[in-house]
């Protein structure tokens, strides 16, 4: 295999700077046939830097949140660190949650591209941490988040009492997990209490960059109508296939990675500074109660965001210091 120097540098930064992989630790590189090149670079980057590195390639899953085979779950439980460049995300799976509970550090990299890995891991982690922690602090004690846009988004999400997750990509403590690269603050809105209209105009997980806006009306925490072009129909079909709770609002998040840009891959898109994302489906991993094998994020560009009555972002521009 011919190694790409920039990808090798990014792989080493991921393993040693963000995950803190140590010489006495074991690492599992979990990948599939679609992302095996990134998996191989991570495997090679770990050589000599840890006690043992295992490379495991499984068949790609059909949807985000689908459980891996039981043999993979068992392997994940038996190492110190898991890094998972996979076509479909295992972030919101029981396999990942179980590994984390047992103290394994897990970095998920769903559908990551080589460009994303090289670009986003070149960002200064200190700057991402600063922005992420600022927004997490501002979210403390907030009862309701409201998002509006010129395109017609106007949605209200109660979040009182829910866990605020500041995801910086730095995963060095026992049992920590998250996306890598990262840069977002997210939370699980209270189930059944989100109301309003959301106009998604950036991208959508499992679909990619949006050719036309997708307008979703939400009542009692569930998407009740999905309108737009062919991609709107595609989204509705995906959610319908997954089940009723796939239509439930599961997450609200704000991107904080200044190096990220819209590419059509949700791993990077939801980290873009100046955007927010709303996801439908599973939110158990973030302290919610929606348990279903589907979690799909949609991006909204240039949002105006209020934490209770305080404006936090104005048309995509942060207005707090």
Image (cartoon, rainbow, N blue to C red):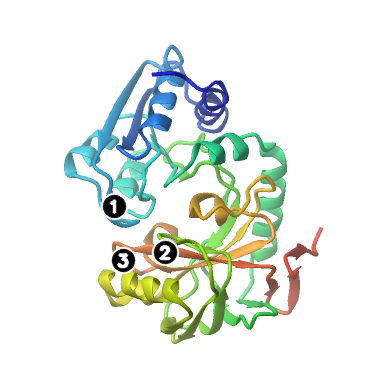
**Residue 21 spot, x, y in % from top left:** 47, 25
Q: Is residue 197 above or below residue 64?
A: below
How many dots with numbers?
A: 3
- Dot 3: what SS? loop
- Dot 1: what SS? helix
Q: Quadrant of residue 151?
A: bottom right
**Disc 1 designates what residue?**
94
Dot 2 crowding, Cα within 10 Å, few <14, some 14–19, many 20+: many
Q: Nearer the viewer, mark 3 or mark 2?
A: 2
**Residue 70 spot, x, y in % from top left:** 18, 43
Q: In the rendered view, does 271 fall on the left or right side of 32?
A: right
Q: Are marks 3 and 1 in contact (CB under 8 Å)?
A: no
Q: Is residue 94 above or below residue 216?
A: above
- Dot 2: what SS? strand
**Disc 2 designates what residue?**
296
Q: Nearer the viewer, mark 2 or mark 1?
A: 2
- Residue occupying the point 38% across, 62% down: 295
**Residue 238 spot, x, y in % from top left:** 32, 69
Which is nearer the N-term, disc 3 or disc 1?
Answer: 1
Dot 3 crowding, Cα within 10 Å, few <14, some 14–19, many 20+: some
**The label number, if any, that marks residue 291 in the structure image:** 3
Which is nearer the N-term, disc 3 or disc 2?
Answer: 3
Q: Is residue 260 above or below residue 288?
A: above
Dot 1 crowding, Cα within 10 Å, few <14, some 14–19, many 20+: some
Give the quarter of the figure containing the C terminus.
bottom right
Q: Quadrant of residue 6?
A: top right
Give the quarter of the figure containing the N terminus.
top left
Q: Nearer the viewer, residue 182 or 205?
A: 205
């Amino acid at each position: 295999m011919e190694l790409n120097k920039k990808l090798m540098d990014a792989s080493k930064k991921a393993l040693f700077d963000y995950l803190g992989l140590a010489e006495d630790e074991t690492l599992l590189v979990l990948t599939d046939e679609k992302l095996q090149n990134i998996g191989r670079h991570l495997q090679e980057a770990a050589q000599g830097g840890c006690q043992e590195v295992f490379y495991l390639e499984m068949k790609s899953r059909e949807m985000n949140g689908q459980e891996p085979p039981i043999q993979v779950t068992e392997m994940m439980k038996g190492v110190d660190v898991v890094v998972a460049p996979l076509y479909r995300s295992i972030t919101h799976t029981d396999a990942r949650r179980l590994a984390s509970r047992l103290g394994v550090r897990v970095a998920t990299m769903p559908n990551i591209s080589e460009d994303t890995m090289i670009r986003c891991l070149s960002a200064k982690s200190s700057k991402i941490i600063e922005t992420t922690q600022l927004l997490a602090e501002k979210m403390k004690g907030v009862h309701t988040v409201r998002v509006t846009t010129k395109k017609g988004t106007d949605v209200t999400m109660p979040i009182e009492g829910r866990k605020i997750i500041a995801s910086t990509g730095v995963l060095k403590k026992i049992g920590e997990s998250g996306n890598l690269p990262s840069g977002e603050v997210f939370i699980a809105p209270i189930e059944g209490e989100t109301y309003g209209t959301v106009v998604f105009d950036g991208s959508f997980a499992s679909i990619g960059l949006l050719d036309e806006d997708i307008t979703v009306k939400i009542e009692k925490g569930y998407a009740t109508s999905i309108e737009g072009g062919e991609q709107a129909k595609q989204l509705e079909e995906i959610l319908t296939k997954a089940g009723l709770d796939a239509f439930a609002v599961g997450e609200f998040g704000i991107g904080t990675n200044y190096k990220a840009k819209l590419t059509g891959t949700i791993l990077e898109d939801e980290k873009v500074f100046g955007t927010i994302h709303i996801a439908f489906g599973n939110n158990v991993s973030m302290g919610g109660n929606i348990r279903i094998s589907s979690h799909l994020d949609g991006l909204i560009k240039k949002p105006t965001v209020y934490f209770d009555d305080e404006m936090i972002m104005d048309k995509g521009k942060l207005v707090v210091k």
